[in-house]
Image (cartoon, rainbow, N blue to C red):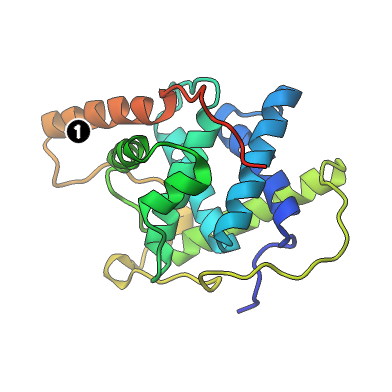
Amino acid sequence: MPSSILTCTNTIQLSEFVAHLVPKIWTGTPFMTTDRLNLFRTFCQNIIKATQISSSCILVALFYIYRLRFAYPSIRGSMGSEVRLFTTALILANKFLDDNTFTNKTWSEVSSVPLHELNIMEMEFLSALQYRTCVHHVQFFSWTSQCQHWMSQLTARTLFISTPPSRRMNKRSADHFMVDKATTSKKAYYSHSVLSWSSSSYHPSAASAASAVATVAAATAMNVNYSNFIPRV
């Protein structure tokens, strides 16, 4: 498999892409106020540079955010929620993909989010996803293709910052995915929604209760105020 799964690999371009894609996934539009976009772009650049996280990990994090939005379309994030969403999604993606993972303490240091808040956000995010962090390889490559399409659109609109050729950033993990053999099915994943939140083993009342709890968790994970965020320079 190629060493990179995206056409952009340097930190600045990846940060620009994430800064536009997170609000696109979350609100349906890639546009934020200039100040807010600049703040989030700086945050993305700093955290990607500090962690040297792989592009696969970034893609999985974005996919988790998509799953959360798809499952709870009525929830509205507060100002600054994109910072917490992306940070928490990166934590989960790092733990899902990588053998050698960062501790939450390290994530707290590089993101400037207090450790106890990160721990709460992680649990709430997991609860909202019903602890389903596995991404099938067919889902992953379909999602990668979609992200590449969005990236091409972004490039066509000349939103990328022009940067000189640079050395590819070192990765903590290879750009590949583990196939969850236990969940592999003969049914093509393309024929289903990328999200499957129901189970035939659930009693309707139990499923309803679980959904209510997950909805509260999703709202909590996204609407914690983050007014104290100060980007690292």
Please state, as top left, top right, bottom left or bottom right, where the C terminus lies in the image: top right
Q: Circle 1 sits in a helix, a strand or a loop, which is it?
A: helix
Total numbered circles: 1
Q: Is residue 226 left or right of residue 124?
A: right
Q: In this view, does 78 lie to the left or right of 41?
A: left
At label 1, which amino acid type do we have? Ala
Q: Which of 120 and 75 is in front in this view?
A: 120
Residue 93, visible in the rendered structure: yes
**Residue 21 spot, x, y in % from top left:** 64, 40
Q: Which residue was labeled with disc 1?
A: 210
**Residue 131 spot, x, y in % from top left:** 28, 48
Q: Which residue lies furthest to the bottom in this view?
A: 1
Image point 67% across, 32% down: which residue?
39
Q: Which of 90 and 136 is in front in this view?
A: 90
Image point 80% across, 66% down: which residue?
166
Image point 57% across, 63% down: which residue?
54
Please state, as top left, top right, bottom left or bottom right, where the N terminus lies in the image: bottom right
Q: Which of 233 and 36 is in front in this view?
A: 233
**Residue 182 spot, x, y in % from top left:** 26, 69
Image point 31% across, 41% down: which residue?
119
**Residue 197 spot, x, y in % from top left:** 31, 42
Task: Please tell me whether residue 191 is drawn above or below residue 38 in the rendered image.
Answer: below
Task: Please tell me whether residue 200 is drawn above or below residue 170 in the rendered image.
Answer: above
Q: In this view, does 61 lie to the left or right of 18?
A: left
Asked where in the image residue 165 lies, by quadrant, the reply is bottom right
Q: In this view, does 167 lie to the left or right of 220?
A: right
